[in-house]
């Protein structure tokens, strides 16, 4: 089970629950696993970084697969560029082109992109 919204009460009877929202009332865990993650921590590492961008890109598809709610950041039933915009602009407070994720787009980003240039696209978002 995954939640990207607030819920009043949550009971886990076995299995795994990943909560990226809030539980307002009771939380009952009966032999299950509860993972609490910040919105945007898509790989559940505890931080929001380039690996989460790569994880989101990995969910993009030309077909219409089942959408995992953890990756549908805007909650529209589709994982696409809108979710990527929300992750990069709102949750990470960064801009496209900020290859080193230091908060600005400058010559250091250009140099990083030039060094990691991959015309076949085999190395992920940040080389």
Image (tube, rainbow, N blue to C red):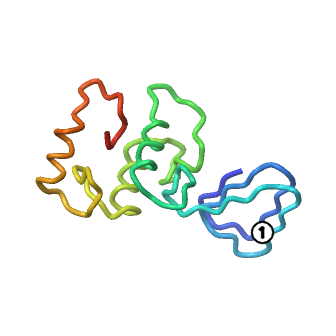
Q: Position of residue 62 (x, y in %)?
A: 44, 26
* Quadrant into which the C terminus falls: top left
Which residue is most to the front?
115
Residue 90 appears left or right of 103 = right
Q: Position of residue 119 (x, y in %)?
A: 24, 26
Q: Is residue 20 above or below residue 126?
A: below
Residue 19 appears left or right of 127 = right
> Which one is nearer the viewer's eye here, 110 or 78?
110
* Dot 1 alpha-carbon crowd within 10 angstroms: few under 14, some 14 to 19, many 20 or more: few
Q: Position of residue 36 (x, y in %)?
A: 64, 63
Give the image quarter of residue 6: bottom right
Mark 1 lies on a secondary structure that is loop
> Which one is nearer the viewer's eye here, 109 or 16?
109
- Residue labelled with disc 1: 9
Give the image quarter of residue 120: top left
Residue drawn at point x = 21 percent, y = 34 percent: 117
Which residue is most to the left?
107
Residue drawn at point x = 54 percent, y = 63 percent: 38
Q: Position of residue 110 (x, y in %)?
A: 15, 47
Total count of labels: 1
Residue drawn at point x = 35 percent, y = 52 percent: 85
> Which one is nearer the viewer's eye here, 100 or 6?
100
> Which one is nearer the viewer's eye here, 108 or 75?
108
């Amino acid at each position: 089970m995954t939640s990207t919204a607030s819920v009043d009460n949550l009971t886990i009877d076995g299995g795994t629950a990943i909560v990226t929202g809030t539980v307002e009332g009771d939380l009952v865990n009966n032999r299950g696993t509860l993972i609490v993650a910040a919105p945007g921590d898509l790989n559940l590492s505890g931080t929001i970084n380039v690996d989460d961008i790569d994880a989101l890109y990995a969910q993009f598809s030309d077909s219409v697969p089942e959408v995992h709610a953890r990756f549908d950041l805007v909650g529209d039933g589709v994982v696409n560029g809108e979710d990527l915009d929300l992750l990069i602009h709102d949750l990470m407070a960064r801009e496209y082109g900020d290859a080193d994720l230091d908060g600005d787009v400058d010559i250091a980003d250009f140099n990083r992109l030039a060094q990691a240039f991959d015309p076949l696209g085999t190395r992920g978002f940040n080389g």
